[in-house]
Amino acid sequence: MHSIMIAPCGMNCALCYAYQRDKNKCDGCWGAYEQKPNSCRKCSITNCEHLAKPGSKFCYDCERFPCTRLKSLDKRYRTKYHMSMLENLSNIRTYGIDVFVNNERERWKCAHCGGTFCVHHHCCSSCGKN
């Protein structure tokens, strides 16, 4: 898991089923456009004009932070997947990307095999354990 896998919204793309699958694997929000699922290509957050500004890498750099779209995404992920984009962004801003990535590596590591859990399927992508 590397910092390049953290999307502008705070999503850890390494936890996404599209990144973890074997066929038509997505490279994450910062990866190649051609590899992304349509939903990611059309993402209003990744394509936000504020992120196109020099030096802007995460949504918290925006004067509109947190915008309506990000709040909606955060609510959906907190409810369905028990993960908060806003909390992730707060931790990145407070502790830095390296500390955040190290914490994520431990938080989402499978106790059974050491693989990485899929946030969308609630199981390990390596061994399938819940």
Image: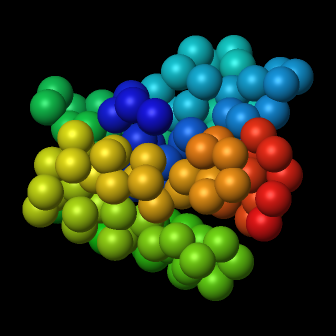
Q: Nearer the viewer, residue 63 or 111?
A: 111
Residue 55 location, quadrant: top left
**Relative to 73, is 67 on the left or the right?**
left
Q: Residue furthest front?
A: 112
Q: Is residue 121 above or below residue 75?
A: above
Q: Quadrant of the C terminus?
A: bottom right
Residue 20 image position (x, y, % from top left): 72, 36
Residue at the (65%, 72%) spot, across then down:
81
For the image, the number of numbered tags is 0
Q: Quadrant of residue 123?
A: bottom right
Q: Is residue 40 left or right of residue 78?
A: right
Q: Position of residue 111 (x, y in %)?
A: 61, 58
User: Is 27 in front, or is 113?
Assistant: 113
Residue at 35 percent across and 63 percent down: it is 88
35 sits left or right of 28 in the view: right
Q: Residue at x 21, y 49 (%)?
A: 99
44 relative to 68, above or below: above
Residue found 52% across the figure and 34% down from its top: 29
Residue situated in front as seen by the camera: 1 or 4 = 1
Residue 77 percent coordinates (x, y)? 60, 72
Q: In the image, residue 80 lies at what x, y percent? A: 70, 77
